[in-house]
Image (cartoon, rainbow, N blue to C red):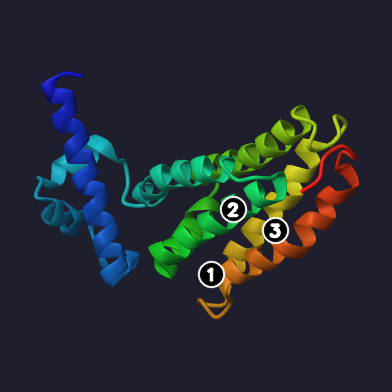
Amino acid sequence: MGKRQIAAQQTRQRILAAAEKLIRERGFERIGISDIAREAGVAKGSFYTYFRHKEDIVCEIAQTRFLTVEAAARAQQDVCTRIASFLTQSMRYIVETGLNICQQWLKNVVEPGEEQGKQKLRYDTEVIRGLITDAAACGELRADTPSEALAACIAAEYYGAVALWAITDGDSDPVVILENFGLHALRAILEPYRNERSSE
């Protein structure tokens, strides 16, 4: 990687860090691109080199963290724990990031033609499907486990917890909701497909 590419990458990271800091402190609606650029120590035009809109930064902030969460989940002992870890750790990050970012992200996702949020849904569903498929491939679950259908159901629970947290203005606890889902409902969902040779 050349010096220009390294410098560009560093500038992008400064903009992301500045945006995350300001959103946490003031809320998404109370900051502008000028504020983000000033906090990052870059010219306002530099923002547009990396992002089209202020809203685009919401999904970008989370992307790296979710990849880390996925890697940690894959290291867990059994399929239920792997999926539960991915869901709860992802949700912990969303809560850490703040209710304002979550609410803004949900607003963005439902906009006609909006693609970034849909990419996140596809990513989450694909991670869950992959965890189920891997468990079937290693004999933990049966080979005929309907990974796509199960992943869609599990992703719906996850996004329901996200939406409930945003709708109730933070009165619900989405981490607890998903912890309970992992302890009870998730095991019940996967139990019919457990391979008799496998035990947790």
The residue beneath circle 1 is: 166
Do tag 2 and tag 3 residues touch (Cβ < 8 Å)? no
The percent coordinates of residue 49 (x first, y second) are: 22, 35
- Label 3 is placed on what type of residue? Glu
Callout in the foreground (3, 1): 3
The residue beneath circle 2 is: 85
Quarter assignment of residue 186: bottom right
Q: Give the CA distance from mark 3 to mark 1.
A: 14 Å
Q: Residue at x 64, y 54 (%)?
A: 84
- Label 1 is placed on what type of residue? Ala
Residue farthest along the bottom direction in this orientation: 171
Quick one: SS at disc 3? helix
Callout in the foreground (1, 2): 2
Quick one: SS at disc 2? helix
How many other residues sit within 10 Å of disc 3, few (<14), some (14-19) or many (≥20)? some
> In which quadrant is the N terminus drawn?
top left
- Of labels 3 and 1, earlier in sequence is 3
Q: Give the CA distance from mark 1 to mark 2.
A: 21 Å
Left or right for 42, reference 158? left
Q: Give the CA distance from mark 2 to mark 3.
A: 14 Å
The residue beneath circle 3 is: 157
Q: Can residue 114 be seen by looking at this rendering?
A: no
